[in-house]
Image (spheres, rainbow, N blue to C red):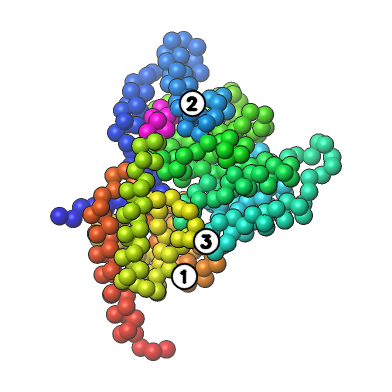
């Protein structure tokens, strides 16, 4: 029997039951975490325990974690702390990184979506730091795992290059927790962005982890919360859920080999029924849960809507444009033409996924592909 199939984990993962339990428990607490009475102290205790849980996830110290409303705010807080002219970002970064630094220098990626390290080195050599000791530090921003293709970036190598040229390294690691292990020291990251709802936590909670000694300039002012780095009363329940999701991230990593097997089966079956389909990032290291491929001649939006009618939820890339489907800048940066990029969809799996989900997707996708081919054959020649 067919059931509704959710294959959009890179947009938002379903809430894990233990996370919901932690949030419900936190919702029973009345106090404002900034209040000094016992009710406030109870709320503060929840936040500080979550701060410890988030720090433990990435090998950081608890006092290096700054809670935000999500990954977008954390990216803006990180990049907004630096002079835009001194920022270098990968061409495949999330819109919240590119939009936070409109004056940044763009470092290219190769055809697999992997940052071109030689180009990064060249860009930093061409723009050396000023001799003025008061000049602001520079920043390189490289994501750990791409939200559209799942391609894992060479963050540690980029950090080594950045540090050799007197720059700091920011890493958008939003898609990584619960899929690959994260250690800030091994990555060489000075700033790292996280978001709860990508790992089975709630929407509305994220964090910027800032290595000790790195200066962060607050975007929101007017209160002393988060040690003055992020004004506004903390979302206690969402933060509690964030912490609980971090504790469960290891379960997701253990599940990746199973998801990767289903992902590989999906891609093999797509290739068999549509040899002209293009698969993105297959030649690079990828998250085990993510696949991005095309249905030649059929718009991404058409595929998403047709699959939705068949009870299957996928996406056409980043879910951050108020429901709009546009041509992916990530795929264009990888060398795809506009026509090819505009026919791609992303499938992302997670903790509730089942083997039968792949069968349902293939059945619906193949039927749409057959209809599209028949319509193309019936169309009059130009």
Residue 340 got which mark?
A: 1
Element type at mark 3 = loop
**Vertical arrangement, residue 352 with respect to residue 330, above or below:** above
Residue 343 location (% of width, % of height): 42, 68
Could you give the CA–CA distance between mark 1 and mark 2, rounded to whole angstroms? Answer: 43 Å
Q: Quadrant of residue 203?
A: top left
Of the pair 172 and 222, the residue shown nearer to us: 172
Residue 86 location (% of width, % of height): 72, 47
Write the residue at 32% across / 78% down.
373
Looking at the image, is mark 3 or mark 1 nearer the viewer? Answer: 3
Write the residue at 35% across / 88% down.
380
Which mark sits nearer the N-terminus, 3 or 1? 3
* Residues shaded magenta: 238-248
**In the image: residue 183, left or right of residue 196:** right
Q: Residue 299: in sight, yes or no?
A: no
Q: Residue 6: in sight, yes or no?
A: yes
Residue 51 got which mark?
A: 2
Which mark sits nearer the N-terminus, 3 or 2? 2
Could you classify mark 2 by the number of other residues whose Cα lies within 10 Å: few (under 14), some (14-19), or many (20 or more)?
many
Element type at mark 2 = helix
**In the image: residue 132, left or right of residue 228:** right
Element type at mark 1 = helix
Give the quadrant of the N terminus: bottom left
């Amino acid at each position: 029997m067919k059931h509704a199939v959710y294959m959009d984990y890179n947009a938002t993962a379903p809430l894990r039951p233990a996370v919901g339990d932690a949030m419900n428990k936190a919702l029973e607490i009345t106090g404002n975490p900034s209040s000094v009475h016992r009710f406030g102290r109870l709320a503060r205790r929840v936040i500080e325990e979550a701060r410890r849980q988030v720090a433990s996830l990435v090998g950081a110290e608890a006092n290096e974690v700054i809670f935000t409303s999500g990954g977008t705010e954390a990216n803006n807080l990180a990049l907004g702390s630096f002079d835009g002219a001194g920022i270098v970002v990968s061409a495949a970064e999330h819109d919240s990184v590119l939009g936070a630094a409109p004056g940044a220098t763009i470092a290219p990626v190769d055809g697999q979506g992997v940052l071109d390290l030689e180009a990064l080195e060249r860009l930093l050599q061409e723009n050396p730091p000023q001799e003025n000791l008061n000049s602001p530090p520079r920043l390189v921003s490289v994501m750990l795992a791409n939200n559209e293709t799942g391609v894992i970036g060479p963050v540690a190598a980029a950090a080594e290059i950045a540090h050799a040229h007197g720059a700091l390294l920011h890493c958008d690691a939003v898609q990584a927790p619960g899929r690959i292990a994260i250690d800030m020291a091994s990555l060489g990251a000075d700033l790292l962005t996280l978001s709860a709802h990508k790992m089975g936590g709630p929407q509305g909670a994220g964090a910027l982890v800032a290595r000790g000694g790195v200066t962060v300039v607050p975007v929101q002012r007017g209160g002393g919360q988060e040690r003055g780095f992020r004004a506004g009363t903390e979302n206690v329940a969402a933060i509690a859920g964030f912490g609980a999701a971090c504790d469960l991230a290891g379960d997701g990593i253990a599940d990746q080999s199973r998801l990767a097997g289903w992902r590989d089966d999906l891609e093999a079956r797509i290739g068999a029924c549509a040899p002209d389909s293009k698969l993105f990032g297959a030649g690079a290291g990828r998250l085990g849960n993510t696949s991005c491929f095309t249905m030649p001649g059929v718009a991404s939006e058409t595929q998403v809507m047709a699959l939705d009618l068949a009870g299957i939820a996928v996406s056409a890339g980043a879910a951050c444009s108020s429901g709009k489907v546009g041509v992916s800048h990530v795929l264009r940066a990888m060398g795809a033409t506009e026509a090819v990029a505009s026919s791609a969809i992303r499938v992302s799996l997670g903790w509730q996924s089942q083997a039968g989900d792949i069968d349902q997707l293939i059945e619906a996708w193949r039927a749409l592909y057959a209809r599209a081919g028949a319509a193309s054959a019936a169309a009059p020649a130009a």
